[in-house]
Amino acid sequence: MSSYDYDLFVIGGGSGGVRASRMAAQSGARVAIAEEYGFGGTCVIRGCIPKKLFVYASHFGEDFEDAAGFGWTLPERHFDWKTLVANKDAEIARLSDLYTANVKKAGVEIFMDRAEFTDPHTVRLKKSGKTIRAERFLIATGGRPQRDIGVPGQEHCITSNEAFHLEKLPKRVVIVGGGYIAVEFAGIFDGLGCDVTLLYRGDKVLRGFDEDLRDCLTASLARRNIRVVTRRNLKKIDKNDGKFFVFTDHNEMIETDLVMAATGRVPNTDGMGIEKTAVALGERGEVKVDEYSRSSVEHIYAIGDVTDRLALTPVAIHEAMCFWRTVYEGKPTKVDHHLVPTAVFSQPEIGTVGLSEVQALERGFAVDVYKSTFKPLKHTLSGRDMRSQFKLIVDTKTDKVLGCHIFGFDAAEITQVVAVALKMGATKADFDATVALHPTAAEELVTMRTKSYSKEPA
């Protein structure tokens, strides 16, 4: 008889942990999972899903305005923040319940509790005090917003977690940061009628994305009257009479009703008793793993944002499937982080897959660049000042498409399909040989026949 209570104990009920626990249980393993908040993790509860719902909500103001160009006359519009939050909460609860039900259906035992290691094979559940021993562990605790931004008054900031549960919509918002969460919430708050200032220490938002996309987004933010203040460091935040006062290193003071810190996320490993397992952590607190998601301790694995590899929900699910195949199917499967598509739900949105122009040159590729910038058909009648851009990065020597970058409506939907083509090794000739679907924005991908320019690596 086994000396272990379970064959696998999963810590964390997000998308990765749920998928791994279900698949392992369906393979015949005795599996338990501990989750201290609610099933669904960052994506379902305080990330992708509620954010996308808020993005949808923020679009309607412009949609109502655009309708006039198509002959529609609309009555006076009114937005109710509490209705949006309540409806969002109901949908998140429904999804979280589905996750829970699917875990139970697979035969996984659920502990709604915080699990902390007491030794490499044992965890203690914090609320119940129950001690559990398992042959193997999977850490899937995700990440959390960075709250320590290193300035006096940082306690006055909210993060993306709290933004989904505000009692009322503020009139003025200062967002500190320039990554995808910062620009997404800038668009959300602006679309819902707030006066938004984006404060960023870099020279341009969305570091790491293709430079043309960064430029397109910066121009779009300006057209939307979102104040983007770059090359600024936050000095302190004061609060007085219900208002906040943000001070920068340029002797500026910005008065606002809400300050949101969106300066990144960190792996969620604090207080887990990791030090009692000999599992190696990185500088940011991430669990260091090999290409099979195994930690420095042979029987302890980790997947998802807690490993700080590629913090995307579908990637966590992919890593979960690789873990399952490796451990429970006997088919060692390395995690593949190559050509993962990603999106920024700015307004309009960004979709990207593969190498940026800069990345391709840095890796030694000579590239041909194809670009198309145009006004979307919809806005020829709406009159809105908006431009879309499609960009392909092509290897000069092989004609292989190395990257695709899109700025415009439905960019994410288009990019998902393009990712299949790039994963299959499509060339520019393959794109050119494909008949266009007209009239669509996506047809630009197969009709860009003239090179914009070529570049050689330095």
Image (cartoon, grey):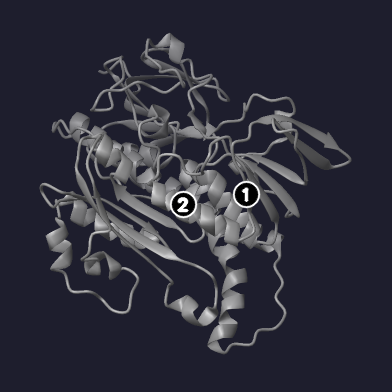
Q: CA distance from mark 1 to mark 2?
A: 29 Å
In this view of the protein, can residue 173 be seen by the observer?
yes
**Residue at 51%, 42% in the rendered image:** 179
Examine the rendered structure and indicate whether residue 172 appears above or below residue 59.
Answer: above
Please name the residue shown 37% across and 10% down the image: 278
- On residue 215, the disc is 2
Label 2 secondary element: helix
Compared with residue 86, is residue 277 higher up or lower down, i.e. above or below? above
Q: Residue at x 30, y 31 (%)?
A: 30
Residue annotated with mark 1: 164
Q: Position of residue 208 (x, y in %)?
A: 40, 39
Percent x, y for residue 391? 31, 57
Residue most toward the right?
241
In the picture, the disc for residue 183 is none
| Lateral position of residue 101 relative to residue 224, left or right | left
User: Left of 182 or right of it: where is 267?
Assistant: left
Of residues 371 and 327, which is closer to you in this image? 371
Label 1, residues with CA under 10 Å away: few <14, some 14-19, many ≥20: some
Mark found first going from the N terminus, 1 or 2: 1
Q: Quadrant of the C terminus?
A: top left
| x 42%, y 52%: residue | 213
Splitting the image into 4 quarters, where does residue 136 fall?
A: top left
- Assign the N terminus to one quadrant of the image: top left
Where is residue 389? Give x, y as percent: 38, 61
Q: What amino acid is labelled 1 in the image? A: Phe
